[in-house]
Amino acid sequence: KQEVTQIPAALSVPEGENLVLNCSFTDSAIYNLQWFRQDPGKGLTSLLLIQSSQREQTSGRLNASLDKSSGRSTLYIAASQPGDSATYLCAVRPGGGADGLTFGKGTHLIIQP
Amino acid sequence: DAGVIQSPRHEVTEMGQEVTLRCKPISGHNSLFWYRQTMMRGLELLIYFNNNVPIDDSGMPEDRFSAKMPNASFSTLKIQPSEPRDSAVYFCASKTGTAMNQPQHFGDGTRLSIL
């Protein structure tokens, strides 16, 4: 059974710092990996989707990498801002045609002004 | 564009009552997912549909839970009878299946409290 782990569970940094969030998964037979953002009382917003054949994806100040063979992904946030404060969730879609996502428990990020 | 719409946003009811959660996916999306989020277990897939047909319901916790998708624009998740341990935030998500690597789009969830 696929398990997704996110480290750290919580992180608080001063504004302007670059930071890295980590995600690991136990079964490397994935179709893709997604990073989501969740704000309090809200649903999830998709940030980046990396196909299993890709190594990284970038969107603005965000960069996500994928090392499928080692079961790891990182989300890099450059020049953090208070508006980046949220919970960040990593999710994998299994290979073999199944479409449901398996999620990590998230990293709760606070950017101090 | 309207996103995924869930109703109600909040539901408080007593144990033993029937609860019905509703979801309207994004128009044109042909896959729909129901997830449950709790502090202890995080986000878990309950069931998903492709073209209104249930594909994988292995995440449905027990027979008290049932889900239907009578047409492409509406789905329900029903709990009968409800129990306090069903208290959670229930999310609906949809995606288009026309390309394999499309992200899922989530609604704002229904916060369910069973007393």
Image (tube, rainbow, N blue to C red):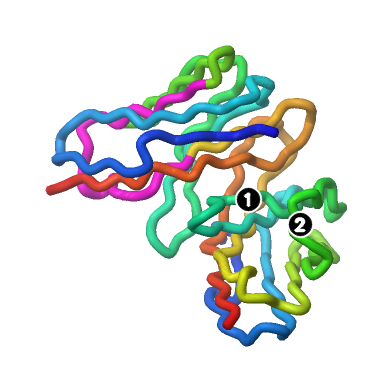
> Secondary structure beneath disc 1?
strand
Say whether marks 1 and 2 touch (CB < 8 Å).
no
Q: Amino acid at mark 1?
A: Glu
Does B22 sit left or right of B112 as displayed?
Answer: right
Which labelled disc corresponds to residue B44? 1
Q: What is the chain letter for disc 2?
A: B
Q: Identify the magenta region.
A: A72-89
Q: Is residue A98 or residue B7 the one in the foreground?
A: A98
Both labels 1 and 2 in a single chain: yes
Residue B105 at x, y percent in the picture: 58, 49
Dividing the picture into quadrants, the one containing residue B25 is bottom right
Dividing the picture into quadrants, the one containing residue A30 is top right
Mark-to-mark CA distance, 1 and 2: 10 Å
Dividing the picture into quadrants, the one containing residue B89 is bottom right
Q: Is residue A67 above or below residue B114?
A: above
- Quadrant of the image for the N terminus of chain A? top right
